[in-house]
Amino acid sequence: MAEPGPPPDPATALAGYLRRLDGPPVVLTGAGMSTDSGIPDYRGPDAPARMPMTISEFRSGPTARQRYWARSHVGWQRMDRAAPNAGHLALAGLQREGRVGAIITQNVDGLDERAGATSVIDLHGRLDRVICLDCGAISARPDLAARLAALNPGYGQGLTPQQRPDGDVELADTSGFVVADCLICGGVLKPDVVFFGENVPPDRVARCYALVDTAPGLLVLGSSLTVQSGLRFVRRMHREERPVAIVNRGSTRGDEFADLKLDAGCSQTLGGLLPLLDPVADGTPAPG
């Protein structure tokens, strides 16, 4: 019996998956898409310990919010400097060429859109927006960052705290930090992201299901699918017998539902993908 040959490289294997579809798949991205931009992930081998603040703790009183905003203010200065990596740029290019469809991202960094992607649903919200828990007003995070810098001049300068996946940092003492309130009503401000203990807004979930239910396949990039908010879309696709491909370093909760699982990095895999699809000039997948 002949010895089996080496497995195809991840880009080649993923190109084969895309060619077998009768249209562009919907994409679900996770933290692994942004690690090459310097944003740590949640569950990789080198991921820092994660103790995210829950929404109930955030609402519990001024001390908890002071701790959150001090850490988040310092972390935002780094997050705001993060740039799209090769994976983000390649994914945006694949979308422009009609090779993939809309993107559902579990990330809150906004890097998909900064890379040029369109039709992006921010499943868990965006760190660059702020919401008032009292009046519901939405404002820009850079504006709040400027206000916090004025209230806390020099805060965090000279420190090299560990960056955390949620966009904040480790700080031992936050007792001197001054928190800003809503300019409209004086209410409590919170990043416009889904905290632990909160539910993704139902209308947002419905928009995602509408995409999933009309796509010929689902491509998962850089997500361990540990949380139900993303895993449910994989299960839906599998239940309806449409193919799922997963690109992620390490195992995921969705591996049993995947038609193709690639243990690889997103930037590496996506960066080599488009040239493999170039022979299809009109954007229609070639026969498998």
Image (cartoon, rainbow, N blue to C red):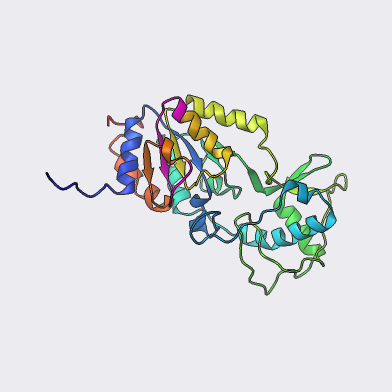
Q: Position of residue 153 (x, y in %)?
A: 78, 68
Dividing the picture into quadrants, the one containing residue 138 is top right
Question: In the figure, is residue 46 to the left or right of 123?
Answer: left
Question: In the figure, is residue 233 to the left or right of 275?
Answer: right
Dividing the picture into quadrants, the one containing residue 259 is top left
The extreme bottom residue here reads 158
Question: In the figure, is residue 30 to the left or right of 108?
Answer: left
Q: Residue at x 15, y 48 (%)?
A: 3
What quarter of the picture does the N terminus occupy? top left
- Is residue 178 rendered magenta in the image? no
Q: Residue at x 66, y 31 (%)?
A: 202
The answer to whether one can see residue 254 in this image is yes
Dividing the picture into quadrants, the one containing residue 185 is top right
Magenta stretch secondary structure, dominant: loop
The extreme left residue here reads 1
- Considering depth in this image, is 247 or 280 the residue closer to the camera? 247
- Is residue 248 rendered magenta in the image? yes
Q: Position of residue 71 (x, y in %)?
A: 71, 61
The answer to whether one can see residue 97 in this image is no
Q: How many marks?
A: 0
Q: What segment is highlighted magenta in the picture?
A: 238-253
What quarter of the picture does the C terminus occupy? top left
Q: Position of residue 160 (x, y in %)?
A: 63, 71
- Considering depth in this image, is 218 or 156 the residue closer to the camera? 218
Q: Residue at x 30, y 38 (%)?
A: 16
Looking at the image, is 190 positioned above or below residue 244?
below
Q: Residue at x 55, y 58 (%)?
A: 40
The extreme right residue here reads 186
Looking at the image, is 258 positioned above or below residue 65?
above
Q: Position of residue 261 (x, y in %)?
A: 38, 43
